Amino acid sequence: MATTTVQTPASTGGIPLRIKLQRVERRRKVSAFVLVLPLFLFILIAFVLPIGRMMLNAIHDDTLLALMPRTTEVLEVWDGKELPDERVYAALAEDLKQAWTQKTAGKIGARMNYELPGAASQVRSSARMVSKLSDGPYKAAMIEISPLWGQHEVWSLLKRGSSSYTAFYLLRSVDLQFGPENSIVASPPENAIFRDIFLRTLGIGIGVTAATLLLGFPLAYLLATLPLRTSNLLMIIVLLPFWTSVLVLTAAWVVLLQDHGVINETLMKLHILSQPAELIFNRFGTVLAMTHIQLPFTLLPIYSVMRSISPSYVRAARSLGAGPFYAFWKVYFPQTLPGIAAGCLLTFILSLGYYITPALVGGPTDQMVSNFVAIYTNEQLNWGMASALGAILLVATLLLYFVFNKLVGVDRIKMG
């Protein structure tokens, strides 16, 4: 029985064409990877790693473990019921002596002060005084030096410090804290501020998004229906906030809205007002200034979608007997929903992270989460709380994006 042999086509160099094509494809992939590599490294270094570090700082704190190794080690076997025994107090004394010598008592006090306000000064004074003690017994001596060491919650705090990871910052960011026997309880009313701050941030973001949509949709429609030459001129005016610093724009609104600013002076000269209106350092000024800055971010996606909608659709609806409003609402408006969804989502996410504008134009009750992140970072040097607030805001933003995409996402709009 005769057999037929299938020969693989060969190139001029004797190499099979299939292998040569594989080599060409491999080189193409390597070239594409080399071109993308700088952007990938930039995103990794400037975006992924900082966010990862922030998420880690929200749950990682080894201050007490590193600066009080003896105390945290012996506390691992403490039952947490009564005050620790003499061995634990002796370890505490040795750690405080070393901290006083190495000038780290301030760091220990600052870390304990996060959970027990007022502990910082007592820790420093205890370290100074215990350095003069030659030998024990230490338990009675330490309690005599400072009543702090006779409090049960102090030892619970130090026992939690035996781990490099802590839930304190995340709990504090949602107005919770550790209670007796390490149970999780609500923070005292005078310290429970962060839930209101997160709700305020979401409320301002929603308000700014709604305002930019109400202003941006008609303007986008006007730009999309005008002749191209005229719309391009108007678009340059709309894009001016893109070319101006946020700080400059905010300072301009301060000049306009202050008690003796341009707006109040004009209204008073026209005898519309008898005294200056409170236009600044309140929620109105904050939303107004943020709306001005964010308007292009909402308008541009809507405008780009409107430019792609053929006018023949509305004309066809009108020719079939639909009125102007009905034709717009049933034919034109549904086609703009992808642009509305993209613009509103972009504006809302950007509004959640505002810092400069609320700080300069808003009042004390208008400060957003970013303001407290800045305070903890720049003033209190509490990186744990700053990271926890940032992490919660990031997770909340991602969850809102996921829910938004499921409910009114672009894919769902197209399917509808």
Image (tube, grey):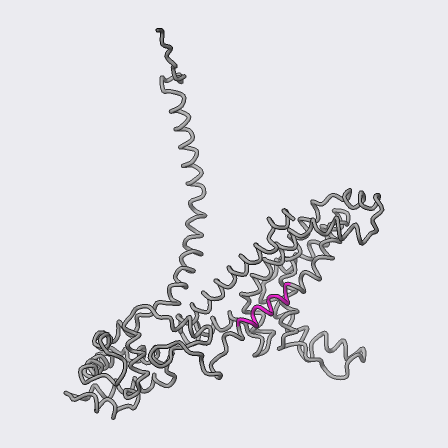
- Given the current orientation, which residue lies at the most extreme left position? 135
Residue 296: x and y in percent read 65, 58
Image quarter of residue 33? top left
Q: How many labels does the image show?
A: 0
Q: Is residue 119 left or right of residue 415?
A: left
The magenta stretch spans residue 208: yes
Residue at (70% x, 53% y) in the render: 235
Residue 212: x and y in percent read 67, 62
Q: In this view, does 413 lie to the left or right of 113?
A: right
Q: Quadrant of the N terminus?
A: top left
Residue at (30% x, 68% y) in the render: 164
Q: Overall secondary structure of the magenta stretch?
A: helix
- Given the current orientation, which residue lies at the most extreme bottom position? 144
Residue 222: x and y in percent read 75, 54
Residue at (53% x, 57% y) in the render: 402
- 299 or 136: which is nearer to us? 136
In the image, residue 390 sits, relative to residue 339, either above or below, namely below
Q: Give the range drawn in magenta.
A: 198-209
In the image, residue 366 sits, relative to residue 339, either above or below, namely below
In the image, residue 216 sits, relative to residue 306, either above or below, namely below
Residue 290: x and y in percent read 62, 67
The magenta stretch spans residue 176: no
